[in-house]
Image: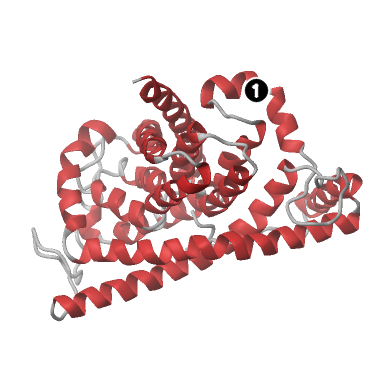
Amino acid sequence: MSASNTNIKYAYKKELGLETFVFPVIFAGIFILFASRMGLANALNTMMNTAYRLLIDTVLYITAICVIMGAISQLLSEFGFVSLVDRLLQPLMKPIYGLPGAAALGVVSTFLSDNPAILALAEDQNFRHYFKNYQFPALTNIGTAFGMGLIVCTYMYSLTPAMGLPLGMPVFTGLAGAIIGSVVSTRIMLIFTRKYYGEEADQPASLPGETEVPKNMRQVRYGGIGTRMMGAILEGGHSGVKMGVSIVPGVLVICTLVMMLINGPSASGEYTGSAYEGIRLLPMLAQKVDFILKPLFGFSSPEAIGVPVTALGAAGASLSLTSSLLSQGMIQPGDIAVFTAMCMCWSGYLSTHASMMDSLNCKKLIGKAILSHTIGGIAAGVAAHWLYVLFSLI
């Protein structure tokens, strides 16, 4: 995801504790790591210059895509296409995911927008009563697995000219891999929740005063077709702007740090403080475990591991890193398939899972949700890689 969530809640700790003294040491250690290789002035200049270039070259481009796709998704919803997809997906939900058919609406809504879209549905008592207690927390996993799906797929496919090869098949296999990862994540989560809640307890029925949407009906805007179309376009575009703005912290902070861990010095071999320089720590570590990463994900270069690592915190930042690696010739179509699967399935879950589970009143299961989704994202990447290999042979 996008890196922010308005439902974040705060707890209290003692004014002074162990972390009060440990954190400054770790924080200083990070700066020493970069300064010892690059020089303090160069490290700080590279950090600022990289963040600026990411803001200008990447964030604005992703924001433009979010605005366009936001408008399209609202049009699809306004004129019933989303309802059609929801109806088509409902028969698949129980046998595949172990969830009621209503969960299909969560899949569609998060695919068209972002992870927290599932929370708006979860607040609706008419939606909740379809679920058993043990099924309800799994909405976090299935929603996150499809979060920003439309944006991720569209962005990856838009890299076709830069790649010089058609990326339709890699993106499609990546989408298939993400679906497999979502099934793995949701099913593992249900194992935990079934033990915790049992199988019989239901979610509460609709509360008094709730506005119920009549059966087999959907909400639309007032006015004629033209008015509804313009309203959907403008509202969808506005939501795209908010989504684009929300990815700024993730791209500038997380992606800057990851790129400084991935890239090396300038072409001259010296550190100059320019954008996109770094200490090449992550590729060095990836080479140590390449015997594991290669058969699992088939990465074309050690630097490619940075994309799924970045997706842990923010999908938008991982998209930015993808274009940077592509411009340096470090990735191939097979990597795009794996990136699509893992960026979509993980979509910043480390930055959203805790607050989403808290919003669902399932704080005690946050660790289980994160563990389930970690396994699901790995399964998504492995599935996408081998599906791509299989389709390439046909």
The residue at the point 39 percent across, 37 percent down is 178
- Where residue 259 appears, as percent x and y from the top left, is 69, 47
- Where residue 283 appears, as percent x and y from the top left, is 71, 33
- Where residue 260 appears, as percent x and y from the top left, is 74, 48
Determine if residue 147 is in view. Answer: no
Residue 134 left/right relative to 354: left
Question: What colouring style does the render use?
Answer: secondary structure
| Residue 304 in which image quadrant | top right
Residue situated in front as seen by the camera: 150 or 96: 150
* Image label count: 1
Q: Determine crowd level at label 1: few under 14, some 14-19, many 20+ residues with C-alpha closer than 10 A.
A: some
351 to 123, vertically: above or below: above
Residue 293 left/right relative to 93: right
| Residue 384 in which image quadrant | top left
Residue 380 left/right relative to 23: left
The residue at the point 73 percent across, 43 percent down is 263
Residue type at mark 1: give it: Asp
Determine if residue 349 is in view. Answer: yes
Task: Name the residue tied to disc 1.
Answer: 290
The residue at the point 37 percent across, 71 percent down is 237
The residue at the point 65 percent across, 43 percent down is 328
Q: Quadrant of the C terminus?
A: top left
Residue 65 left/right relative to 20: left
Label 1 element class? helix
- Where residue 306 appears, as percent x and y from the top left, is 63, 40
Residue situated in front as seen by the camera: 16 or 167: 167
Residue situated in front as seen by the camera: 160 or 184: 160
107 to 380, vertically: above or below: below
